[in-house]
Amino acid sequence: MSESRELTSTYRLQLHSGFGFAAAAEVVPYLDELGISHLYLSPVLQAVPGSMHGYDVVDHSRISDELGGEDGLVALAAAAQARGLGIVVDVVPNHMGLPTPAYLNAALWDTLRFGRDSETATWFDVDWELCDGRLGLPLLGGRLDEVLAAGDLELSEYQGRPVVRYFDQVFPVAPGTEGGSVADVLGRQHYLLGDWRSKDDILGYRRFFDVDTLVAVRVELPEVFDATHAKLVDLASRGVIDGFRIDHPDGLADPEGYLSRLRDATGGAWVVVEKILEGDESLPASWPTAGTTGYDAIRAIQTALVPDVGPALDELWRGTGAQASLAATELEAKRLVLDLLLEPELRRLVRRAGPAAARAGHDLAPDDVEAALRELLVQVETYRAYVRLDQAPDDEAVQRIGALRQRAERVRPDLASALKVLQDLLLDSTTSDEDGRDLVVRFQQVCGPVMAKGVEDTTFYRFHRMIALNEVGGDPAALENPSPEALHDWAERQSLATPTAMTTMSTHDTKRGEDVRA
């Protein structure tokens, strides 16, 4: 295929069954006239049928049939390249969709059918120990005994094999476990069905945030990376795809390792990451990426445009009866999120921290371990601490975890001992203790959901003196000291560190468009 022009500007197209590759090809002339260099496509791999966004991938081995299949994507790339344009695609490495019926995700279906013996069992971030070797699925509308009594679970067949049906959902039956009642058959499976309200107790897999139908994938394993990225890497090698936008890298066990593997697999393709940077946080220089998708640009530009109206808006805000500060509102929101949405993730951390601490010679009460972990998570101020397994943490990571412990200790001085032990465990990235290693990784994977759900999705709707600042990656506190100089400082850093990163004023994930914020 012909060479596309240098990547200088993108135009995002949200693909779905009503707007696939053929429809996208029809607007290529218009996009060329706009002066863009590349089409930026939402996820193109096979997603849950009917998906309007594509982030619930069910098959990494093929391009979405609903969008037009691989032939359609190749034709779109040819149409774009005929006008000197290229293609950038959105990649979702962190999770896959748990569809209805479940057999639409063949890898997950095989894991449910064969359990730990499945060839794809290592794909998914499953806590097999939680339910005694079974994968907990809290997907029922009531307790298992109630659902069975109501006759809502039935034995059936799919493609000549026995299955269990629950309305539109279907679950596999392991070979040799047929026979008897539905309850008897379910008791022999590698999964455990339960009431959706029991997820705090039995949810057996890591999720994307609190979305039960998005099951986390372990792309840190080379074989899983290869299996889930082979199609995209092949398309890049053939010149169909020029670059990638990486969705939610903070959910990965090792973002830097993932990006390095992607760079090597694609020969150094242009890659940007959906990374939210807080305050003066910078993208790690060791990450092999062109930069972020631009939330930091939104914050810098938006802040420069804020008028000096802080005192007036403060007075108006107090007139509404609002008393809590921004900081207090954030802390309250994070506590709420942990209590209501992320309890399964917190409990998994507790199950790792307790044994790791004990083997390190610390006798901590289980309640203290849970309370200390909860307080540490409430106090997080960034989406990640950047601690990598088998590498000594750098000074910034040590400082970040240390400051986290200090903030938590000021609130809960009674937990000082437990907090110090946890600080040491979270920084012990070279430990050989499996629970300790798991804790180092998983704590960071939970920080992102706490920040996203607690700050962007809760605080920003409770504390809103100027809603233009309450944006993904934004900072409502910028109202206190708006400064055009900060924009110049950011632009200088950007030009030196990541000159080909995205600069944007809105994305498909922002709360509002730039016109509304203005």
Image: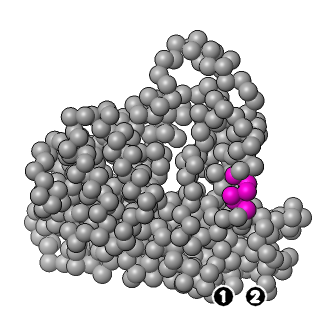
Q: Is residue 247 magenta?
A: no
- Locate the C terminus and report the quarter of the image it occupies: top right
**Tag 2's secondary structure?**
loop
Along the line of sight, the residue nearer the viewer: 327 or 235: 327
Please rate how many residues cluster around mark 1, counting C-alpha atoms within 10 Å: few if below 14, some from 14 to 19, many from 20: few
Name the residue that disc number 2 marks.
1
Q: Position of residue 444 (x, y in %)?
A: 38, 56
Q: Nearer the viewer, residue 76 or 423?
A: 423
Magenta segment, prevailing SS (helix, strand or loop): helix
Q: Relative to 137, is 207 on the left or the right?
A: right
Task: Tell me the amino acid under the disc marked 2.
Answer: Met
Query: Which residue does the numbered mark 1 point to in the structure image?
Result: 238
Is residue 48 at all visible to an observer of this figure?
Answer: no
Viewer can see residue 174? yes
Q: Which residues are magenta?
A: 490-495
Rate crowding at label 2 as few (under 14), some (14 to 19) or many (20 or more) other CA atoms within 10 Å.
few
- Tell me, yes or no, whether the two marked residues, 2 and 1, touch with CB atoms within 8 Å: yes
Q: Nearer the viewer, residue 76 or 339?
A: 339
